[in-house]
Image (cartoon, grey):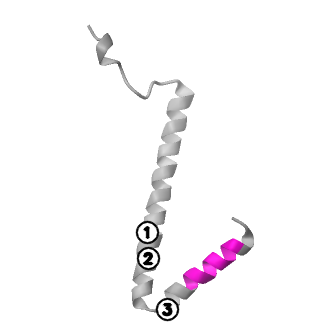
Amino acid sequence: MTRSQRTKLVETRADLILAGESATEDYALHFDTQLRRSVVRRILYHAYLYFARSGAALSGPDPREIV
């Protein structure tokens, strides 16, 4: 995302916030959703790196091999 695209996005968000109470509530919900999604992605990415670097098998044991 370029600086001008980011500026337009911020201006649009500000317009939505200043548009009225209902728009503010909608934006707050949207922002909260984005925030939670980014936190989950970060956690999953760090877990992936941990397992990838340790060489751990993510699928678990194969039940057909258990005797």
The crowd level at tag 1 (other Cα within 10 Å; few <14, some 14-19, many 20+) is few
Residue under label 1: 32
Which label sits in the foreground, 2 or 3? Answer: 3
Circle 2 packing at 10 Å, graded few (<14), some (14-19), many (20+), is: few
- Label 1 with label 2: CB-CB less than 8 Å: yes
Q: Is residue 17 above or below residue 56?
A: below
Instruction: Tell which tag, 1 or 3, sits nearer the viewer.
Output: 3
Q: Residue furthest right?
A: 3
Q: Who's the residue at 55% across and 36% down the image?
A: 49
Name the kind of residue labelled 1 in the image. Asp
Numbered mark located on residue 3 in the image:
none
Range covered by the magenta-colored residues? 5-14
Q: Which mark is residue 19?
A: 3
Q: Is residue 13 magenta?
A: yes
Which image quadrant is residue 22 in? bottom left
Q: Secondary structure at mark 2?
A: helix
Location of residue 35 in the rendering, given as x and y in whole percent from the top left corner = 48, 63
Q: Which element carries disc 1, helix, strand or loop? A: helix
Question: Percent x, y for residue 24?
Answer: 44, 84
Q: Position of residue 3 (x, y in %)?
A: 73, 71
Q: On the image, numbered disc 2 is attached to which residue? A: 28
Amino acid under label 3? Ala
Horizontal placement of 36 versus 65: left or right? right
